Amino acid sequence: MNEHTQPVALDKAYRLINHGPTVLVSARHAGVDNVMAAAWACGLDFSPPKVTVVIDKIAATRGLIEQSGYFVLQVPTVEQAALTTRLGTTTLASDPEKLAHAGVELFEMEGVNLPLVAGCSAWLVCRLIPELHNQQAYDLFIGEVTHAWADSRAFRDGHWQFETAAPELRSIHHVAGGHYYAIGDAIATHS
Amino acid sequence: MNEHTQPVALDKAYRLINHGPTVLVSARHAGVDNVMAAAWACGLDFSPPKVTVVIDKIAATRGLIEQSGYFVLQVPTVEQAALTTRLGTTTLASDPEKLAHAGVELFEMEGVNLPLVAGCSAWLVCRLIPELHNQQAYDLFIGEVTHAWADSRAFRDGHWQFETAAPELRSIHHVAGGHYYAIGDAIATHS
Protein backbone atom coordinates (compact mmCIF):
# COMPACT_ATOMS: atom_id res chain seq x y z
CA MET A 1 0.00 0.00 0.00
CA ASN A 2 0.96 3.63 -0.24
CA GLU A 3 -0.59 6.94 0.76
CA HIS A 4 -3.08 6.65 -2.10
CA THR A 5 -4.59 3.38 -0.81
CA GLN A 6 -7.86 4.50 0.76
CA PRO A 7 -10.85 2.56 2.09
CA VAL A 8 -14.01 2.40 -0.02
CA ALA A 9 -17.40 2.30 1.74
CA LEU A 10 -18.92 -1.15 1.28
CA ASP A 11 -22.13 0.28 -0.20
CA LYS A 12 -20.01 1.80 -3.00
CA ALA A 13 -17.75 -1.23 -3.49
CA TYR A 14 -19.82 -2.62 -6.38
CA ARG A 15 -18.76 0.42 -8.42
CA LEU A 16 -15.17 -0.79 -8.44
CA ILE A 17 -16.10 -3.53 -10.94
CA ASN A 18 -19.46 -2.32 -12.27
CA HIS A 19 -17.86 -1.15 -15.53
CA GLY A 20 -16.63 -4.66 -16.31
CA PRO A 21 -12.85 -4.55 -15.94
CA THR A 22 -10.67 -7.61 -16.17
CA VAL A 23 -9.47 -8.43 -12.65
CA LEU A 24 -6.66 -10.18 -10.86
CA VAL A 25 -7.75 -12.83 -8.36
CA SER A 26 -5.41 -13.56 -5.47
CA ALA A 27 -5.60 -16.03 -2.59
CA ARG A 28 -3.49 -17.52 0.19
CA HIS A 29 -3.53 -20.85 1.98
CA ALA A 30 -0.97 -22.62 4.15
CA GLY A 31 1.82 -20.26 3.19
CA VAL A 32 1.12 -20.39 -0.56
CA ASP A 33 0.11 -17.24 -2.44
CA ASN A 34 -1.12 -17.09 -6.00
CA VAL A 35 -2.56 -14.55 -8.42
CA MET A 36 -4.47 -15.21 -11.65
CA ALA A 37 -6.27 -13.07 -14.20
CA ALA A 38 -10.02 -13.33 -14.78
CA ALA A 39 -12.19 -11.55 -17.33
CA TRP A 40 -15.34 -13.11 -15.94
CA ALA A 41 -15.87 -11.28 -12.67
CA CYS A 42 -19.11 -9.43 -12.04
CA GLY A 43 -21.26 -7.71 -9.46
CA LEU A 44 -24.02 -9.81 -7.89
CA ASP A 45 -25.54 -7.66 -5.13
CA PHE A 46 -25.28 -4.17 -3.65
CA SER A 47 -25.75 -4.60 0.09
CA PRO A 48 -24.07 -6.55 1.36
CA PRO A 49 -21.95 -6.35 -1.78
CA LYS A 50 -21.45 -9.68 -3.51
CA VAL A 51 -19.52 -10.68 -6.60
CA THR A 52 -19.18 -13.65 -8.92
CA VAL A 53 -15.99 -14.88 -10.54
CA VAL A 54 -15.37 -17.83 -12.86
CA ILE A 55 -12.29 -19.88 -11.96
CA ASP A 56 -11.28 -22.88 -14.03
CA LYS A 57 -10.49 -26.21 -12.39
CA ILE A 58 -6.89 -26.05 -13.63
CA ALA A 59 -6.21 -22.81 -11.72
CA ALA A 60 -4.03 -23.27 -8.64
CA THR A 61 -5.73 -20.21 -7.14
CA ARG A 62 -8.96 -22.18 -7.04
CA GLY A 63 -7.65 -24.65 -4.48
CA LEU A 64 -6.36 -21.81 -2.30
CA ILE A 65 -9.81 -20.21 -2.33
CA GLU A 66 -11.63 -23.45 -1.59
CA GLN A 67 -9.31 -24.20 1.31
CA SER A 68 -9.05 -20.72 2.83
CA GLY A 69 -12.56 -19.49 2.09
CA TYR A 70 -11.28 -16.09 0.94
CA PHE A 71 -10.11 -14.34 -2.20
CA VAL A 72 -9.29 -10.85 -3.42
CA LEU A 73 -10.48 -9.25 -6.67
CA GLN A 74 -8.31 -6.36 -7.75
CA VAL A 75 -8.46 -4.06 -10.75
CA PRO A 76 -5.24 -3.92 -12.77
CA THR A 77 -4.27 -0.80 -14.69
CA VAL A 78 -3.10 -0.06 -18.22
CA GLU A 79 0.42 -0.08 -16.80
CA GLN A 80 -0.18 -3.69 -15.65
CA ALA A 81 -1.59 -5.05 -18.93
CA ALA A 82 1.47 -7.20 -19.74
CA LEU A 83 1.58 -8.41 -16.12
CA THR A 84 -2.10 -9.34 -16.32
CA THR A 85 -1.52 -11.37 -19.47
CA ARG A 86 1.42 -13.17 -17.86
CA LEU A 87 -0.61 -13.99 -14.76
CA GLY A 88 -3.42 -15.27 -16.95
CA THR A 89 -1.26 -17.54 -19.11
CA THR A 90 1.10 -19.18 -16.60
CA THR A 91 0.24 -21.58 -13.81
CA LEU A 92 1.73 -22.22 -10.41
CA ALA A 93 1.77 -25.92 -11.27
CA SER A 94 4.07 -25.44 -14.26
CA ASP A 95 6.12 -22.66 -12.64
CA PRO A 96 6.30 -22.66 -8.83
CA GLU A 97 8.06 -19.28 -9.09
CA LYS A 98 5.26 -17.83 -11.22
CA LEU A 99 4.75 -14.72 -9.08
CA ALA A 100 8.46 -13.88 -8.87
CA HIS A 101 8.94 -14.48 -12.59
CA ALA A 102 5.96 -12.26 -13.40
CA GLY A 103 7.35 -9.53 -11.17
CA VAL A 104 4.30 -9.30 -8.91
CA GLU A 105 4.70 -7.24 -5.77
CA LEU A 106 2.31 -8.25 -2.99
CA PHE A 107 1.29 -6.37 0.14
CA GLU A 108 -1.09 -6.88 3.05
CA MET A 109 -3.62 -4.63 4.72
CA GLU A 110 -3.94 -4.67 8.50
CA GLY A 111 -6.39 -7.26 9.72
CA VAL A 112 -6.55 -9.11 6.40
CA ASN A 113 -4.26 -12.11 5.96
CA LEU A 114 -4.41 -12.11 2.17
CA PRO A 115 -2.00 -11.13 -0.62
CA LEU A 116 -2.94 -7.90 -2.42
CA VAL A 117 -1.27 -6.95 -5.70
CA ALA A 118 0.58 -3.64 -5.57
CA GLY A 119 -0.07 -1.12 -8.34
CA CYS A 120 -3.73 -2.03 -8.90
CA SER A 121 -6.39 0.68 -8.70
CA ALA A 122 -8.85 -1.17 -6.43
CA TRP A 123 -9.04 -4.19 -4.15
CA LEU A 124 -12.11 -6.13 -2.96
CA VAL A 125 -11.56 -8.69 -0.21
CA CYS A 126 -14.20 -11.42 -0.52
CA ARG A 127 -15.38 -14.16 1.78
CA LEU A 128 -16.35 -17.23 -0.25
CA ILE A 129 -20.03 -18.11 -0.02
CA PRO A 130 -19.81 -21.85 -0.62
CA GLU A 131 -22.10 -23.01 -3.41
CA LEU A 132 -20.72 -26.39 -4.37
CA HIS A 133 -23.06 -27.03 -7.28
CA ASN A 134 -22.10 -23.72 -8.94
CA GLN A 135 -18.41 -24.32 -8.28
CA GLN A 136 -18.47 -27.85 -9.67
CA ALA A 137 -20.90 -27.47 -12.58
CA TYR A 138 -20.00 -23.95 -13.75
CA ASP A 139 -16.64 -23.03 -12.12
CA LEU A 140 -18.66 -20.16 -10.65
CA PHE A 141 -17.63 -18.73 -7.27
CA ILE A 142 -19.66 -16.28 -5.19
CA GLY A 143 -18.09 -13.97 -2.62
CA GLU A 144 -19.27 -11.35 -0.18
CA VAL A 145 -17.10 -8.25 -0.14
CA THR A 146 -15.84 -7.63 3.41
CA HIS A 147 -13.27 -4.89 2.76
CA ALA A 148 -12.55 -2.60 -0.17
CA TRP A 149 -9.84 -0.11 -0.98
CA ALA A 150 -8.96 1.99 -4.00
CA ASP A 151 -6.13 4.16 -5.25
CA SER A 152 -7.53 7.60 -4.51
CA ARG A 153 -5.95 8.98 -7.67
CA ALA A 154 -8.25 6.68 -9.71
CA PHE A 155 -11.33 6.28 -7.45
CA ARG A 156 -12.49 8.67 -4.73
CA ASP A 157 -15.73 10.10 -3.31
CA GLY A 158 -17.44 6.90 -4.47
CA HIS A 159 -16.60 7.41 -8.16
CA TRP A 160 -13.96 6.49 -10.68
CA GLN A 161 -11.97 9.57 -11.71
CA PHE A 162 -10.66 8.34 -15.06
CA GLU A 163 -11.51 11.69 -16.68
CA THR A 164 -8.77 13.41 -14.70
CA ALA A 165 -6.51 10.54 -13.56
CA ALA A 166 -3.32 9.57 -15.37
CA PRO A 167 -4.14 7.41 -18.43
CA GLU A 168 -1.94 4.58 -17.15
CA LEU A 169 -4.33 4.17 -14.18
CA ARG A 170 -7.27 3.25 -16.41
CA SER A 171 -8.81 -0.19 -16.12
CA ILE A 172 -8.29 -2.80 -18.84
CA HIS A 173 -10.95 -4.98 -20.45
CA HIS A 174 -9.81 -8.22 -22.05
CA VAL A 175 -11.15 -9.31 -25.41
CA ALA A 176 -9.00 -12.36 -26.22
CA GLY A 177 -5.38 -13.46 -26.57
CA GLY A 178 -3.74 -10.64 -24.64
CA HIS A 179 -5.73 -7.93 -26.41
CA TYR A 180 -7.48 -5.41 -24.19
CA TYR A 181 -9.29 -2.13 -24.42
CA ALA A 182 -8.62 0.53 -21.81
CA ILE A 183 -11.70 2.20 -20.40
CA GLY A 184 -12.44 5.41 -22.29
CA ASP A 185 -14.40 8.63 -22.15
CA ALA A 186 -17.10 9.49 -19.61
CA ILE A 187 -20.71 9.68 -20.78
CA ALA A 188 -23.40 11.23 -18.58
CA THR A 189 -27.12 10.65 -19.06
CA HIS A 190 -30.10 11.62 -16.91
CA SER A 191 -31.24 8.77 -14.72
CA MET B 1 -31.63 -5.83 -38.81
CA ASN B 2 -29.77 -4.23 -41.66
CA GLU B 3 -26.98 -5.24 -44.02
CA HIS B 4 -24.45 -4.88 -41.18
CA THR B 5 -26.13 -7.53 -39.00
CA GLN B 6 -23.90 -10.56 -39.44
CA PRO B 7 -23.75 -13.92 -37.64
CA VAL B 8 -20.98 -14.52 -35.10
CA ALA B 9 -19.56 -18.03 -34.73
CA LEU B 10 -20.65 -19.46 -31.39
CA ASP B 11 -17.06 -20.18 -30.32
CA LYS B 12 -16.36 -16.45 -30.62
CA ALA B 13 -19.62 -15.28 -29.05
CA TYR B 14 -18.07 -14.86 -25.57
CA ARG B 15 -15.97 -12.03 -26.99
CA LEU B 16 -19.06 -9.92 -27.50
CA ILE B 17 -19.31 -9.33 -23.73
CA ASN B 18 -15.83 -10.32 -22.54
CA HIS B 19 -14.82 -6.67 -22.11
CA GLY B 20 -17.62 -6.07 -19.61
CA PRO B 21 -20.14 -3.83 -21.37
CA THR B 22 -23.47 -2.90 -19.88
CA VAL B 23 -26.15 -4.84 -21.77
CA LEU B 24 -29.81 -4.66 -22.63
CA VAL B 25 -31.82 -7.77 -21.74
CA SER B 26 -34.93 -8.48 -23.78
CA ALA B 27 -37.54 -11.20 -23.60
CA ARG B 28 -40.96 -12.15 -24.94
CA HIS B 29 -43.82 -14.21 -23.57
CA ALA B 30 -47.47 -14.49 -24.52
CA GLY B 31 -47.36 -11.43 -26.75
CA VAL B 32 -45.55 -9.22 -24.24
CA ASP B 33 -42.09 -7.84 -25.04
CA ASN B 34 -39.81 -6.05 -22.61
CA VAL B 35 -36.27 -4.69 -22.47
CA MET B 36 -34.23 -3.77 -19.40
CA ALA B 37 -30.67 -2.65 -18.78
CA ALA B 38 -28.18 -4.76 -16.81
CA ALA B 39 -24.64 -3.94 -15.77
CA TRP B 40 -24.17 -7.37 -14.24
CA ALA B 41 -23.88 -9.66 -17.24
CA CYS B 42 -20.82 -11.84 -17.68
CA GLY B 43 -19.28 -14.72 -19.57
CA LEU B 44 -19.50 -18.12 -17.91
CA ASP B 45 -18.17 -20.63 -20.45
CA PHE B 46 -16.62 -20.77 -23.92
CA SER B 47 -18.04 -23.85 -25.58
CA PRO B 48 -20.91 -24.10 -25.56
CA PRO B 49 -20.94 -20.41 -24.70
CA LYS B 50 -22.77 -19.57 -21.51
CA VAL B 51 -23.48 -16.30 -19.75
CA THR B 52 -24.76 -15.07 -16.41
CA VAL B 53 -27.00 -12.07 -15.82
CA VAL B 54 -28.44 -10.65 -12.60
CA ILE B 55 -32.12 -9.72 -12.84
CA ASP B 56 -33.94 -8.24 -9.87
CA LYS B 57 -37.28 -9.64 -8.73
CA ILE B 58 -39.01 -6.33 -9.52
CA ALA B 59 -38.07 -6.55 -13.22
CA ALA B 60 -40.98 -7.43 -15.50
CA THR B 61 -38.45 -8.95 -17.92
CA ARG B 62 -37.68 -11.60 -15.31
CA GLY B 63 -41.15 -13.12 -15.52
CA LEU B 64 -40.97 -13.21 -19.32
CA ILE B 65 -37.66 -15.11 -19.11
CA GLU B 66 -38.91 -17.55 -16.51
CA GLN B 67 -42.04 -18.29 -18.53
CA SER B 68 -40.50 -18.44 -22.02
CA GLY B 69 -37.12 -19.94 -21.12
CA TYR B 70 -35.28 -17.51 -23.40
CA PHE B 71 -33.67 -14.08 -23.29
CA VAL B 72 -31.44 -11.88 -25.43
CA LEU B 73 -28.37 -9.99 -24.24
CA GLN B 74 -27.45 -7.14 -26.54
CA VAL B 75 -24.66 -4.58 -26.42
CA PRO B 76 -25.87 -0.96 -26.60
CA THR B 77 -23.70 1.74 -28.10
CA VAL B 78 -22.60 5.22 -27.07
CA GLU B 79 -25.44 6.52 -29.21
CA GLN B 80 -27.86 4.47 -27.06
CA ALA B 81 -26.60 5.62 -23.64
CA ALA B 82 -29.66 7.73 -22.81
CA LEU B 83 -31.93 4.94 -24.07
CA THR B 84 -30.09 2.46 -21.86
CA THR B 85 -30.57 4.65 -18.80
CA ARG B 86 -34.27 5.03 -19.56
CA LEU B 87 -34.71 1.28 -19.99
CA GLY B 88 -32.89 0.72 -16.71
CA THR B 89 -34.93 3.18 -14.67
CA THR B 90 -38.50 2.58 -15.84
CA THR B 91 -40.62 -0.55 -15.41
CA LEU B 92 -43.32 -2.14 -17.48
CA ALA B 93 -45.43 -2.33 -14.31
CA SER B 94 -45.46 1.45 -13.83
CA ASP B 95 -45.58 2.25 -17.57
CA PRO B 96 -47.17 -0.37 -19.84
CA GLU B 97 -45.98 1.74 -22.79
CA LYS B 98 -42.40 1.73 -21.52
CA LEU B 99 -40.87 0.57 -24.80
CA ALA B 100 -42.78 3.04 -26.94
CA HIS B 101 -42.03 5.90 -24.57
CA ALA B 102 -38.35 5.01 -24.54
CA GLY B 103 -38.32 4.93 -28.33
CA VAL B 104 -37.07 1.35 -28.62
CA GLU B 105 -37.18 -0.19 -32.08
CA LEU B 106 -37.40 -3.99 -32.03
CA PHE B 107 -36.70 -6.49 -34.79
CA GLU B 108 -36.62 -10.27 -35.19
CA MET B 109 -34.16 -12.64 -36.79
CA GLU B 110 -35.45 -15.56 -38.82
CA GLY B 111 -36.06 -18.63 -36.71
CA VAL B 112 -35.87 -16.76 -33.41
CA ASN B 113 -39.14 -15.62 -31.87
CA LEU B 114 -37.57 -12.98 -29.63
CA PRO B 115 -37.40 -9.17 -29.66
CA LEU B 116 -33.99 -7.78 -30.57
CA VAL B 117 -33.17 -4.11 -30.02
CA ALA B 118 -32.25 -2.24 -33.20
CA GLY B 119 -29.10 -0.12 -33.16
CA CYS B 120 -27.12 -2.33 -30.77
CA SER B 121 -23.69 -3.63 -31.80
CA ALA B 122 -24.20 -7.29 -30.81
CA TRP B 123 -26.94 -9.73 -29.89
CA LEU B 124 -26.70 -13.03 -27.99
CA VAL B 125 -29.80 -15.22 -27.96
CA CYS B 126 -29.77 -17.34 -24.80
CA ARG B 127 -31.69 -20.39 -23.67
CA LEU B 128 -32.29 -20.24 -19.93
CA ILE B 129 -30.59 -23.03 -18.00
CA PRO B 130 -32.97 -23.27 -15.06
CA GLU B 131 -31.15 -23.03 -11.73
CA LEU B 132 -33.89 -22.18 -9.29
CA HIS B 133 -31.65 -21.78 -6.24
CA ASN B 134 -29.48 -19.19 -8.03
CA GLN B 135 -32.51 -17.40 -9.40
CA GLN B 136 -34.25 -17.22 -6.04
CA ALA B 137 -31.30 -16.64 -3.70
CA TYR B 138 -29.12 -14.42 -5.91
CA ASP B 139 -31.33 -13.18 -8.80
CA LEU B 140 -28.70 -14.92 -10.94
CA PHE B 141 -29.73 -16.36 -14.30
CA ILE B 142 -27.62 -18.65 -16.49
CA GLY B 143 -28.12 -18.96 -20.22
CA GLU B 144 -26.57 -20.90 -23.07
CA VAL B 145 -25.96 -18.82 -26.16
CA THR B 146 -27.73 -20.41 -29.13
CA HIS B 147 -27.35 -17.65 -31.75
CA ALA B 148 -25.16 -14.55 -31.97
CA TRP B 149 -24.98 -11.62 -34.35
CA ALA B 150 -22.99 -8.42 -34.46
CA ASP B 151 -22.91 -5.17 -36.40
CA SER B 152 -20.04 -5.87 -38.77
CA ARG B 153 -18.92 -2.23 -38.54
CA ALA B 154 -18.13 -2.80 -34.83
CA PHE B 155 -17.29 -6.54 -34.65
CA ARG B 156 -16.04 -8.73 -37.47
CA ASP B 157 -13.56 -11.56 -38.08
CA GLY B 158 -14.09 -12.58 -34.45
CA HIS B 159 -12.86 -9.26 -33.02
CA TRP B 160 -14.19 -5.90 -31.92
CA GLN B 161 -13.08 -3.17 -34.31
CA PHE B 162 -13.41 -0.17 -32.01
CA GLU B 163 -10.05 1.19 -33.15
CA THR B 164 -11.44 1.95 -36.58
CA ALA B 165 -15.23 1.98 -36.07
CA ALA B 166 -17.22 5.15 -35.56
CA PRO B 167 -16.94 6.35 -31.93
CA GLU B 168 -20.72 6.24 -31.47
CA LEU B 169 -20.59 2.44 -31.96
CA ARG B 170 -18.43 1.90 -28.86
CA SER B 171 -19.81 -0.08 -25.95
CA ILE B 172 -20.82 1.65 -22.72
CA HIS B 173 -19.90 0.56 -19.20
CA HIS B 174 -22.14 1.75 -16.39
CA VAL B 175 -20.69 3.06 -13.15
CA ALA B 176 -23.77 4.38 -11.32
CA GLY B 177 -26.69 6.77 -11.72
CA GLY B 178 -26.65 7.06 -15.50
CA HIS B 179 -22.91 7.64 -15.67
CA TYR B 180 -20.98 5.45 -18.08
CA TYR B 181 -17.56 5.14 -19.60
CA ALA B 182 -17.26 4.31 -23.28
CA ILE B 183 -14.72 1.63 -24.11
CA GLY B 184 -11.39 3.22 -25.03
CA ASP B 185 -8.06 2.55 -26.66
CA ALA B 186 -6.74 -0.86 -27.71
CA ILE B 187 -3.82 -2.35 -25.77
CA ALA B 188 -1.93 -5.36 -27.12
CA THR B 189 0.30 -7.58 -24.96
CA HIS B 190 2.04 -10.85 -25.75
CA SER B 191 0.05 -13.82 -24.54
Image: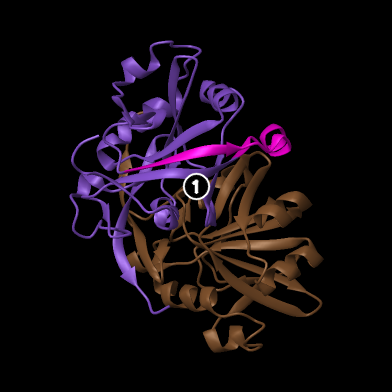
Chain colours: A brown, B purple
Residue type at tag 1: Asn
Q: Residue at x 38, y 11 (%)?
A: B97
Q: Residue at x 78, y 53 (%)?
A: A132
- Residue B163 shows up from this direction: yes
- Residue A145 shows up from this direction: no
Query: Under tag 1, what secondary structure?
Result: loop
> What stretch of residues is rendered in magenta?
B122-141
For the N terminus of chain B, which image quadrant?
top left
Q: Position of residue A172 (x, y in %)?
A: 41, 63
User: Toward the viewer: A57 or B19?
Assistant: A57
Q: Check disc 1 and report the residue beneath it.
A: A18
Say if A76 sits above or below B25 in the image: below
Q: Residue at x 61, y 58 (%)?
A: A54
User: Toward the viewer: A7 or A131?
Assistant: A131
Queried whether the magenta region covers residue B133, the answer comes back as yes
Q: Residues within 10 Å of mark 1 (few under 14, many from 20)?
A: many
Disc 1: host chain: A
User: Toward the viewer: B162 or A3?
Assistant: B162
**In the rendered view, does A108 fall on the left or right side of A80?**
right
Say if B31 sits above or below A52 in the image: above
